[in-house]
Image: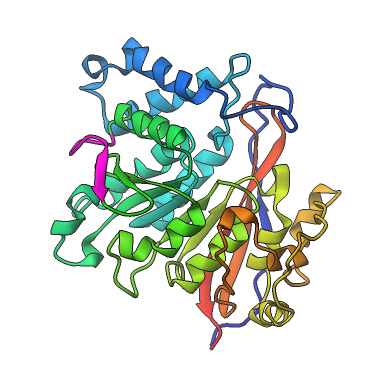
Amino acid sequence: MPIATPTETSFRAAPAPPPKYHEPVQGTVFHGDGREEDLLKHLRSLPSLSRTETSGLSLRDRSQRVLDAIHEFGKGENRYLMSVGETKGRQVEELVRSKKPKLILELGSYVGYSGISFSRHLPELHPSLTFPPDWKAAETSQSRAGYISLEKSEVYAETAAGAVELAGLDKVVKVRDVFQTPAGLRDSGLHEQIVVGSSTTSIKSLRKTLDMPRPMKFDMVFLDHLKPLYTIDLKVLEEEGLVGPGTVLVADNVVKPGNPAYLSWVRATPTQKRQALKLGPMSTQPAPTPNPSLDDGWLTAFRDGPIDETRWVPPEAEGITSKGDPSLIYESQMLDGWDPYTGEKDACEVSTCVGKEE
């Protein structure tokens, strides 16, 4: 039986911060004001991204052109974009190449930056496997590979799907509905699919939606959506068996703005999680837990067990509750990085499920 004590969180230092293009955006309108639609129009207008200009490029070079164009757009006035950026994104790409996941789940497509960045490695890593458009024809579920992205906003999903197409990740079919489900599943190509709808509701029905028989699970999960949903969505993933031993969780923005509730869950021992669950759910939102005041505080913070916020479910979860699977054991590492536009320090928490306490 694995030792039920997670290893101490470590930092993986990031390179120097990027140039500053915007002031911090907290407290301002920084998405959903038309900039996402403008981004897609801009990308489609660029001669460098036309089929004529990209047809002879490798998948990596073609996708990189789109990533660079998205980043450049975000530098403009009132164009800040909530993308993972290069310093954190490159480290996650290294993780994808080293871990070689077959199935990746993303919570929060936004404009498609992370989906393009991470999914483009799958064809090279798994050239003999079957990707989403042909999943129904796959001989076995184990022969599948793909990148599944959940997005609540129709506008963001359309922007992401358009960017994915320009990146060359839709070589089989165009964007269309491929499954009749409450949360419409849009096929955005050879390597990535986008599920439109509430993340928690979509996760609850995801196994049926994707025809994923048990014990099939995701090899990697990237969380980059509404921060209060990180913990409940992970719990639902655990309860549904969609994550388990071997799954690597990558949670963005755990420093800026921070996510103490999520960190306290993945850093807790099974015993600590069971004790917290005995306290029962909270009907009202507790006072927010502050982030550590010092940089080195992140190494030891949130290790006393799940905080009260893990027992509260935000309204965006649409009434879905879950106890998760407290027996799962995670080992965590923080990938240090920066906001790509404001230069503010940020990080991704990488939590590998190393076993289960029976």
What residue sits 67% from the left and 32% below the top? 16
Q: Quadrant of residue 25?
A: top right
From this view, report whether residue 328 is shown above or below residue 169.
Answer: below
What residue sits 20% from the left and 56% below the top? 135
What residue sits 42% from the left and 54% below the top? 105
Magenta residue check for 229: no
**In the rendering, at what x and y percent does residue 131 appear?**
23, 50
What residue sits 59% from the left and 18% below the top? 75
Left or right: where does residue 101 sit relative to residue 179? Answer: right
How is colour applied across the structure in the image? rainbow
**Which of 7 and 266 lies nearest the eye of the viewer?**
266
**Which of 258 and 93 lies nearest the eye of the viewer?**
258
By secondary structure, the bulk of the magenta-drawn segment is best described as loop
In the image, farthest residue toward the right: 293
From this view, report whether residue 90 is shown above or below residue 146.
Answer: above
Q: Give the range drawn in magenta.
A: 169-179
**In the rendering, at what x and y percent does residue 156 appear?**
46, 34
**In the rendering, at what x and y percent does residue 261 appear?**
70, 60
Residue 297 appears in view: yes
From this view, report whether residue 177 is shown above or below residue 10.
Answer: above
**In the rendering, at what x and y percent does residue 149 appear?**
41, 47
Left or right: where does residue 134 sit relative to residue 165? Answer: left
Q: Quadrant of residue 286?
A: bottom right
Left or right: where does residue 296 sit relative to residue 55? Answer: right
